[in-house]
Amino acid sequence: MPVAVPHFKKVHPVHHSATDMFDLVADIDRYPEFVPLCQSLTTRSTRQKSGREVRLADMTVGYKSIRETFTCQVLLHPDTSQIQASYIDGPFKFLENKWNFESTGKSTCNVHFVLDYEFKSRALALLMGSMFDRAFARFTQAFEDRADALYGKSD
């Protein structure tokens, strides 16, 4: 029986501006402070290309004694309030992560979050899959909680 390929898609309304949320998600070096399962993140390089910032980063995720490191290219599109992370190397067959920040008012926005991934190894998918599923289900809330801590909580 084939292992289902995880797909997460969520629209999460928050009481913070699209600009603030874009800046928060774009600050990838701070992820170990608040992102579920993220143990470390190192930006290898940053460059400008066609009006967007391109970063190459290594992220280590883990739970208890299990640790995996993978490399992604992160594209920051401030003009369109979009961030895209594309998998380069590590334990996955593929990993695509997209964020879009849609302004709904002066200090509110909808955070659109999409994540698709598949592990290379069926054994690793069985071992880590449910843990990843639970963590990714809490992803958008972790970013909202971080925004509340940085920018103040509003009603």
Image: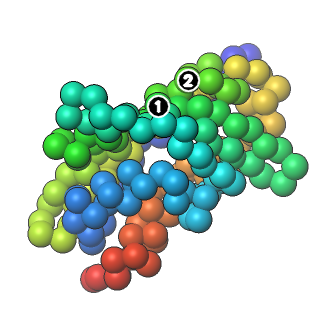
Side (left or right) of 97 relative to 44: left
Q: Nearer the viewer, residue 140 or 77?
A: 77
Residue located at (59% from left, 46% from top)? 42
Labels 2 and 1: the sequence-earlier one? 1
Q: Quadrant of the N terminus?
A: top right
Give yes or no for contact between labels 2 and 1 (Cβ–Cβ under 8 Å).
yes
Residue located at (74% from left, 48% from top)? 62
Number of marks drawn: 2
Residue at far right of view: 65
Residue located at (78% from left, 52% from top)? 63
Side (left or right) of 149 relative to 69: left
Q: Nearer the viewer, residue 123 or 21?
A: 21
- State the image coordinates of residue 113 (x, y, percent, origin top left): 38, 45
Residue at far top of view: 1
Residue with the mark numbered 1? 73
Disc 2, SS: strand
Please give the label number shown on residue 132. Answer: none
Side (left or right) of 113 relative to 103: right
Report the colour scheme.
rainbow
Type of amino acid at the residue the image marks with label 2: Ile
- State the image coordinates of residue 71 (x, y, percent, origin top left): 59, 32
- Decide: is 61 above or below 105: above
Residue with the mark numbered 2? 88
Instruction: Tell me where residue 89 sits by quadrant.
Output: top right
Instruction: Tell me where residue 148 sits by quadrant.
Output: bottom left
